[in-house]
Amino acid sequence: MIKFISCFIILTTSTIGGFVYAESFRKRVKHLNEFERALTQLENEIEYTHTPLPEALECVAEKSESPVKEIFDKISKLLYRNEVDSVYNAFKKCLANETNSLNLNLEDINVILDLSKSLGESDIEGHRKIFSLVKMNLKKRISIAEESMNKNLKLYRYLGFSIGAMIVIVLL
Amino acid sequence: MNNTKEVLEVLPEGITKLIKGFKYEDELQEIRMKVNKPLILQIGNDEIITGYTVLMQDIKEVLKHISNYSIYAFDEEIKQGYLTIKGGHRVGLCGSCIIENNKVKTIKSLGSLNIRVCHEILGCSSGVIPFIVNKNLVSNTVIISPPRCGKTTLLRDIARNLSDGVERLGLRGKKVCVIDERSEISSSYNGIPQMNLGLRTDVLDNCPKAEGIMMAIRSMAPEVIVCDEIGTYKDMDSILMALNSGVKLITTIHGYGIEDLYNRIVFKEIMDNHIFKKAVILSAENGVGTIEYIYDFEKQEKQWRR
């Protein structure tokens, strides 16, 4: 009986583990998409109403989903309080704090950091150029992420179950 | 009344401490910063040259704070060489100008800043109001003054008085619309006037006068329009149009006397049309805001003189 129960536990945990790991691929796509949406909104705030960054970021945060919401909110607060010496540093600090809840890899984050390097330092025309460049890069990242999601989602789900089953067989 | 808190917030820590060390911090008028030169303060009537040498970094820090890290949002203002910060204070910018199509596109590598602390003197127009108001009617008035003699301060207080109404003169509150091309009158921050402009005052902030006057008439149905420093042909056209629709106008020009109105060709049309009924001439003879004389255009004589 005990044997049966422990086998069952091993099988379930490894299956769940596989599902959770597979989920990270989906979350990456989701987070990248959310960033793309948020940046488009930020672009509109800047281009249409010329809203200063702290306020614009706050507005974007209000309409975004977690964890993008928290990140933009924190950046906005840092800028309001004049606690950082540049927008880049504010982004860097906040993104570093949120790496646990963000399922992005280093290259994804660099695309967003690239934007922050020139955010707020030129006129509207300059911003238009930066945003179009960053959005193009972000689209590339999204298509890569989608590809790897399609490839890996099922793979890891099955793999989790298979590994569990393998251990159970060996133990039996 | 001075409010230096907002000014101190944008300054680097070192300078804030230094200024707080002075006794008459409240009377702070100007802070002048130039790279590699000592910081100069204007407190009351005294110019104080401090021992603090301003560094490039200080200027950059101030600029970041005043622009909220967002140069693009103040693009138009930087082109004109100044920014208005919270509390209505004015920061003048100097550096090398970038020119495009014969116009200043932006100012880069800033070398000096001048922070002018904003003054609001409630009640400074009480002496003038009886001359420009006739029972319940407001006369079209022009304030003529050299720079730094308190013309904007006076204009602001006139707007407040007209908007609130003056009971002892039998003046009921008027609907006033302030066209504030350079955020000087209302010192708006995020669209909210930082100065007391009265109960019935609407403000079009940052709006070119010529367009603002027309917009205000169409949208807000004002009885009095207040604007600062008229001087272009476009301004004159819109003023004539505004007066045709029965709105009264209070405005200012740079100058030393009513001759300036007659001599400058740009004012010819409005002088020919006898637009202005009264003129208030300011100087700094007995301190900022001295009223030299008040001129009545209908009687062609000085109604009151110092």
Image: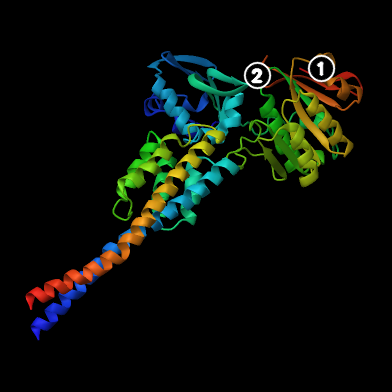
Q: Please state if A40 lies on the left or on the right of A70 as rendered.
A: right
Where's the N terminus of chain A, which quadrant? Answer: bottom left
Q: Position of residue A129 (x, y in %)?
A: 52, 37
Q: Position of residue B24 (x, y in %)?
A: 47, 24
> Which of the pair B164/B32 is nearer the observer?
B32
In this view, B135 is above or below A65: above
> Which of the pair B266/B259 is nearer the observer?
B266
Residue B279 in sight here: yes
Is the residue at mark 2 from the same chain as the one at mark 1? yes
Q: Who's the residue at 37% across and 56% down the image?
A: A147
Q: Who's the residue at 35% across and 42% down the image?
A: A110
Please name the residue that numbered disc 1 is placed on. Answer: B258
Residue A83 in sight here: no
Q: Who's the residue at 31% across and 66% down the image?
A: A154
Please name the residue that numbered disc 2 is placed on. Answer: B102
Image quarter for residue B145?
top right
Element under disc 1: loop
**Tag nearer the camera, 2 or 1:** 2
Q: Please state if B198 lies on the left or on the right of A28 as rendered.
A: right
Q: Chain of mark 2?
A: B
Image quarter for residue B246?
top right
Q: Position of residue B195 (x, y in %)?
A: 62, 37
Where's the C terminus of chain A, which quadrant? Answer: bottom left
Amino acid of disc 2: Asn
> Which of the pair B98/A13 is nearer the observer?
A13
Q: Earlier in the sequence, mark 2 or mark 1?
A: 2
> Which of the pair A165/B211 is nearer the observer?
A165
